[in-house]
Image: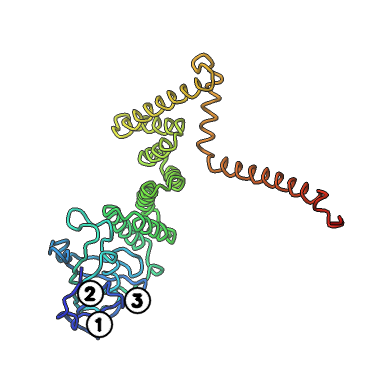
Amino acid sequence: MVLITESERKDFEDILGSGGILRRMLTTNNDGIQAEFGEEVGVKYSAWVLKSGQKVAIDETRKFRIGDGEVMPALELVAKMMHVGEECEVRCDARFAYGDVGLEPYVAPGDEIKLLVELCRVGKRMTSEMSSQELIIEATQKKESGNRYFKEKNYDQAAKLYKRALKLLEMWEHTEEDTAQCKELLIALGNNVANVQHKLLQFKEARQSSLEVLQLDGKNIKAMYRISQIALDQSEFEEANMFLRKALEIEPENSKVRQLLVKLKKKKRDQQARERKLYAKLGGDRTSNPVKTGKLSVLLSIIRRNAAIIAAVAIVIVAILVHVFVGESNREIFESPDNNVNATE
């Protein structure tokens, strides 16, 4: 879709040179402050789907730090270019707005967006100059921005903001009064990071993030549930069962934990049935030989966990065999009388 008509072209500035973001100034104020990277800005904006006119946001106010990716790219870029007190209209491609995911129920994947933006203020204070309480507020804002991206299913950007919030808390020099608040925020961020990592199929990282949460709060149900989910996905039944049982000791009536435990039992039964069939094909009676049955289960578990390593070892073995075979064949050829360089013709 064309962002502007031919008659509008003279009024809009192509700020990227690619036609992806077009801006028309409505109010200018060259004497106003302009934000630098790392500085916080406050904006008021409205947004519509360009094609249909569907309202997405009306007179919303947002605070965000330039360069941290807390808002859609088009909004962040024009805020960086504006002076305080200025207003502009922006039209942009989906890649600079809600992308290929959209924003249910208002924005379909790939929709172009129209914005009206006013830059209300620029905060010159950098994070390195903030007090511990200000850092907690800043980290909380990052978490909330990450939550918005999570709801939009933009998991990569959500993860970046959660991690930025955690990085802010690394700078925090706590007082006794702030300790509980900071710990609560660290736990929430850790669980959020694990959640998006799980959504992105980063199972190892998600498990580690959940374990770090449990170091802060050994009774955290969300972290136990996440580890159990990951273990179940990877058919690590013992670990899944252990953490689910621990969670039920803390919250016996937790329905989500109970549902996952039912799912675990079913998946375990299904796998045992498959193993019995496999064992029968190998010529044995699984039920009559518990020792061999146990060994088979362990073997299958090891194979599942180390499939990549086993495949790599197999490739190396094949390469060695090929090398030996080809080397031996070449040696026989070159030692053959027909190939003797000293032989007469």
What amino acid is at disc 2?
Leu
- The residue that mark 1 highlights is 32
Q: Nearer the viewer, residue 168 or 66?
A: 66
- What's under tag 1, amino acid-wise? Gly
Q: Are marks 3 and 2 in contact (CB under 8 Å)?
A: no
Can residue 262 be seen here? The reply is: yes
Q: Which kind of residue does numbered mark 3 sit on?
A: Glu
For image coordinates 29% across by 30% down, the residue present is: 253
Is label 1 in contact with label 2 (beta carbons under 8 Å)?
yes
Q: Is 294 left, or right, of 323 in this rendering? A: left
Q: Can residue 180 be seen by looking at this rendering?
A: no
Quadrant in which residue 132 is drawn:
bottom left
**Residue receiving disc 3:** 36
Tell me if residue 40 comes above or below residue 82 in the rendering: above
Q: Which residue is mark 2?
A: 119
Q: Secondary structure at mark 1?
A: loop
Q: Residue furthest bottom?
A: 31
Marks 3/2: CA–CA distance: 13 Å
- Looking at the picture, tell me which residue is in the foreground, 291 or 52: 52
Q: Tell me which residue sits at (43%, 48%) in the image.
A: 202
Q: Quadrant of the N terminus?
A: bottom left
Q: Disc 1 and disc 2: Cα gap in Å? A: 10 Å
- Left or right of 158: which side holds 12? left
> Which element is circle 3 on?
loop
